[in-house]
Image (tube, rainbow, N blue to C red):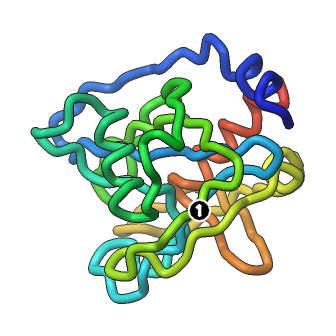
Amino acid sequence: MNENDIRARLLGLVHAPLALDDYWPSAVLVPIEVGRGVWLTLRASHLSRHAGQVAFPGGRIETSDASPEAAALREASEEIGLRTEDATIIGRMDDVLTATGFHMIPVLALVRPGTQFVAAAEEVASVFCLPFADLLDPAGPQQRTGSFRGEDRQFWVWPKAEHLIWGATAAILVKLAQRLRGD
């Protein structure tokens, strides 16, 4: 997909905010590189939360952050070395609530082609790109059911040979793919 296709299909994306006090406010950056795909991280295996999982760069919104966009860019800078001048914010997707207590705001950004990422070893094991061919394949994601805290829950899974993408990250990718395909 080229930049005009991406912008046209994401233009007018309406953000449905949630106001929930029982969740930790967080923001994630959904970095899209024209001609390649969407950049993701594999979280470090020693972390206390979400260790070894595939995620977007992001984290809690701090009181010093001017906005969710600022928080997402700050976290992406800390986790993958993304320079703010290499990212152009293009909007937000719907808020996501996670079973682990996060109120997540996905922030969409176009990243400059060829941007080099450097994983912060204390948080990120690796940075990798999910190619558009995989993202836009409607047969790629699958819904599964699992038990969490005694409740059966349905969740999205994107089984890839190299990485298992699931949960909130997979759900965000499903919505992004649907929007980009025009579903």
In this view, 58 is above or below 34 = below
Give percent across and percent down for residue 66.
21, 30
Give percent across and percent down for residue 10.
68, 22
Q: With 83 as the anchor, is 67 left or right in this view?
A: left
For image coordinates 36% across by 75% down, the residue present is: 123
* Quarter-of-image position of residue 167: bottom right
Give percent across and percent down for residue 139.
89, 53
Nearest the camera: 115 or 55? Answer: 115
Residue 23 appears in the picture as rendered: no
In this view, 140 is above or below 161 = above
At label 1, which amino acid type do we have? Gln
Q: Which residue is mark 1?
A: 116
In this view, 143 is above or below 160 = above
Q: With 5 as the anchor, is 143 left or right in this view?
A: left
Nearest the camera: 152 or 50? Answer: 50
Task: Determine the residue located farthest toward the bottom in the rendered image.
Answer: 46
For image coordinates 49% across by 81% down, the residue present is: 125
Provide the secondary structure element on which disc 1 rests: loop
* Quarter-of-image position of residue 145: bottom right
Quadrant in the picture for the N terminus: top right
For image coordinates 39% across by 74% down, the residue present is: 120
Task: Determine the residue located farthest toward the left in the rendered image.
Answer: 63
For image coordinates 23% across by 32% down, the residue present is: 20
Q: With 100 as the anchor, is 96 left or right in this view?
A: right
> Mark 1: few, some, or many residues within 10 Å (few <14, many ≥20)?
few
Give percent across and percent down for residue 165.
63, 66
